[in-house]
Image (cartoon, helix red, strand yellow):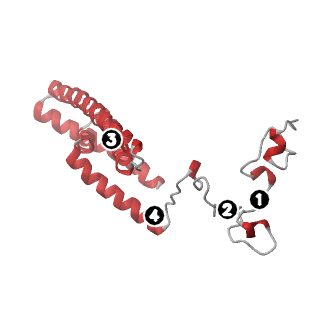
């Protein structure tokens, strides 16, 4: 991964410089500078317009109680596309405009979602839903530290899970009261 990033940061400026020199030879110095400025301004306008539209769709989906997966991916694509358009260069401008125009952004989103789905199926990416990446409120957690399978004779047999980790790692642990064994003692004023 590091090798790819180094190659990207070395290769991209070299290609951009070569393309700018070719454009300069083709249309001249000042028109090339004007082209860079115009694409930057047009790109920032498009990024703002598409970003606002995506933000509104995201809020609408959230208000309806839906997960805004498509809108989140669009937001990331628009953010990257805007950054590419601010960067002077021909190649970055082409890639940036592709990310801002809805038809090409749809194709980019389709490729990105396919790669994410493949990584999730391979186990390279793990996704969790709920509060702060944990289980949703009221559902039993199967994450590390919780006794998921009830065994006879413990408190899990009656439907409650028992914590298997240390006291300070306990989800209801209060930093104010390290000697507290339950959240109720901290609530009753046993703080130190």
Q: Which residue is mark 3?
A: 57
Q: What's the mark number on residue 144?
A: 2
**Mark 4 or mark 2, whichever is nearer to me:** 2
The answer to which of marks 4 and 3 sits earlier in the sequence is 3
Q: Secondary structure at mark 2?
A: loop
Pointers 4 and 2 in contact (CB under 8 A)? no
**Is 136 drawn above or below residue 17 in the view shown?**
below
Kindly identify which residue carries mark 4: 120
Q: Is residue 100 above or below residue 122?
A: above
| Residue 22 spot, x, y in % from top left | 17, 39
Mark 2–mark 3 distance (CA, rounded to whole Å) = 36 Å
Q: Residue at x 28, y 30 (%)?
A: 44
**Of tags 1 and 4, which is closer to the observer?**
1
Q: Where does the image place residue 182, in percent across and percent down from the top left? A: 81, 49
171 sits left or right of 118 in the view: right
Picture quadrant of residue 138: bottom right
The residues bearing labels 4 and 3 have C-alpha atoms spaced at a distance of: 26 Å
Disc 4 from disc 2: Cα separation: 20 Å
Q: Quadrant of residue 189?
A: top right
Estimate how packed mark 2 is, as few (under 14), some (14 to 19) or many (20 or more) residues with alpha carbons within 10 Å: few
Q: Residues within 10 Å of mark 3 (few under 14, many from 20)?
A: some
* SS state under label 3: helix
As helix, strand or loop, the secondary structure at mark 1 comes to loop
Q: Are marks 1 and 2 in contact (CB under 8 Å)?
A: yes
Question: Hey, which quadrant is residue 41 in on the image?
Answer: top left
Distance CA(mark 1)–CA(mark 2): 9 Å
Circle nearer the viewer, 4 or 3 = 3
**Residue nearest the observer in this picture, 15 or 54:** 54
Residue ID for mark 1 = 165
Disc on the earlier residue, 2 or 3:
3
């Amino acid at each position: 991964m590091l090798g790819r990033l180094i190659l990207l940061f070395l290769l991209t400026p070299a290609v951009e410089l070569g393309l700018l020199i070719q454009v300069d030879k083709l249309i001249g110095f000042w028109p090339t500078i004007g082209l860079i400025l115009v694409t930057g301004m047009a790109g920032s306008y498009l990024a703002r317009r598409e970003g606002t539209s995506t933000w509104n769709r995201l809020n609408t989906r959230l208000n309806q109680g839906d997960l805004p997966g498509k809108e989140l991916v669009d937001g990331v694509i628009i953010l990257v596309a805007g950054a590419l358009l601010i960067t002077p260069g021909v190649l970055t401008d082409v890639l940036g405009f592709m990310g801002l125009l809805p038809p090409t952004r749809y194709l980019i989103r389709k490729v990105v979602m396919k790669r994410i789905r493949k990584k999730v199926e391979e186990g390279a990416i793990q996704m969790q839903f709920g509060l702060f990446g944990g289980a949703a409120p009221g559902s039993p957690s199967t994450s590390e530290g919780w006794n998921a399978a009830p065994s006879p004779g413990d408190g899990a047999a009656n439907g409650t899970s028992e914590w298997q980790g240390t006291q300070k790692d306990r989800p209801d642990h209060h930093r104010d009261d390290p000697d507290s064994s339950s959240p109720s003692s901290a609530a009753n004023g046993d703080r130190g």
